[in-house]
């Protein structure tokens, strides 16, 4: 008779909870991703690889880890990048999103239900690239958004967590302009037919409720490390302080359904 330890069962469960069918991507869209997370403007490139069953949105991916923001130093603000990047993996069959997010330099991973956006489709029309797009608006987690989608790309998907419109979303801008996803280019079909849509779960897993507090977790880690260095250098107990700078995250609030 085979026996399995609780640790083995836990590891099997954890691995299976992050498994998914791997699909070949049918296309990719490159966006300019503009954010004001620390109230400083940061421009980066982001990519959406998409298929009928799932997609992955990738930003902050680079060859080497770097820390910068508009040429200023770490103390004044930062944009963290690593070899995997921030990931938003949508599984449309399971109605889930898997997330990998860099907080300071620490990656965290989680899973949440695929958001159900309350879109309102408007009559406004404009061209983005060679695509005729229609305007839709929504409110999501504390921000109002204007989105432009095209039915010429028959996938109900878009950048970041956005989806649910009758076509591909090529542009999303928050009312305050603090967060923008702007279309740059599309490749469909892909030149590289071997591009696979999958999720890399390299990071510390937290359930979604705990994941919402990842910034606080990292702040407390930094505070403890600072206190330890202070005491080891001869500082008096209670003499070390660390203040958390205000941030402007894309998700400002969470409703009961979240």
Image (spheres, rainbow, N blue to C red):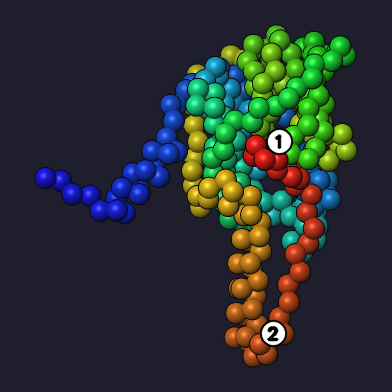
Give the structural element (helix, strand or loop) at label 1. strand
In the rendering, at what x and y percent does residue 165 appear? Answer: 70, 18
The quarter holding residue 175 reads top right
Say whether marks 2 and 1 touch (CB < 8 Å): no
The quarter holding residue 251 reads top right
In the displayed structure image, the side of residue 68 where residue 224 appears, left or right: left
Q: Residue at x 64, y 31 (%)?
A: 115
Residue 85 visible in this rendered orientation of the protein: no
In the rendering, at what x and y percent does residue 16 appear? Answer: 38, 38
**Front: mark 2 or 1:** 2
Q: Nearer the viewer, residue 140 or 255?
A: 255
In the displayed structure image, the side of residue 192 where residue 32 appears, left or right: right
Which residue matches tag 2? 238
In the displayed structure image, the side of residue 171 where residue 188 appears, left or right: left
Q: Which circle marks residue 142 in the picture?
A: none
Q: Nearer the viewer, residue 242 or 113?
A: 113
Q: Residue at x 78, y 40 (%)?
A: 142
Quadrant where the image shows the N terminus: top left
Q: Residues within 10 Å of mark 2 (few under 14, many from 20)?
A: few
Q: Residue at x 59, y 86 (%)?
A: 232
Up-down relation of residue 168 to residue 107 (above or below): above
In the rendering, at what x and y percent does residue 245 appear? Answer: 78, 62
Q: Which circle marks residue 45 in the picture?
A: 1
Distance Cα–Cα, label 2 vs label 1: 43 Å
The quarter holding residue 191 reads top right
């Amino acid at each position: 008779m085979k026996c399995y330890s609780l640790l083995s069962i836990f590891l099997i469960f954890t691995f299976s909870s992050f498994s998914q069918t791997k699909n070949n991507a049918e296309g990719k869209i490159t966006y300019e991703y503009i954010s004001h997370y620390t109230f400083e403007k940061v421009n980066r490139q982001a990519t959406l690889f998409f298929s009928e069953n799932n997609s992955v949105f990738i930003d902050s991916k680079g060859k080497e880890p770097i820390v910068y923001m508009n040429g200023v130093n770490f103390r004044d603000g930062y944009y963290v990048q690593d070899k995997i990047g921030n990931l938003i993996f949508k599984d449309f069959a399971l109605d889930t999103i898997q997330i990998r997010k860099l907080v300071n330099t620490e990656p965290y991973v989680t899973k949440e239900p695929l958001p159900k956006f309350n879109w309102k489709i408007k009559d406004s029309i404009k061209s983005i690239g060679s695509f005729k797009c229609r305007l839709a608006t929504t409110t999501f987690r504390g921000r109002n958004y204007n989105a432009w989608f095209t039915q010429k790309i028959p996938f109900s998907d878009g950048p970041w967590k956005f989806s649910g419109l009758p076509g591909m979303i090529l542009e999303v801008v928050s009312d305050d302009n603090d967060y923008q996803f702007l279309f740059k280019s599309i490749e469909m079909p892909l030149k590289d037919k071997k591009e696979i849509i999958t999720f890399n779960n390299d990071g510390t897993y937290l359930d979604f409720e705990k994941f919402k507090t990842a910034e606080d977790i990292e702040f407390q880690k930094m505070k403890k490390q600072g206190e330890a260095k202070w005491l080891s250098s001869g500082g008096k107990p209670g003499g070390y302080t660390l203040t958390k700078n205000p941030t402007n995250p894309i998700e400002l609030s969470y409703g009961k359904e979240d």
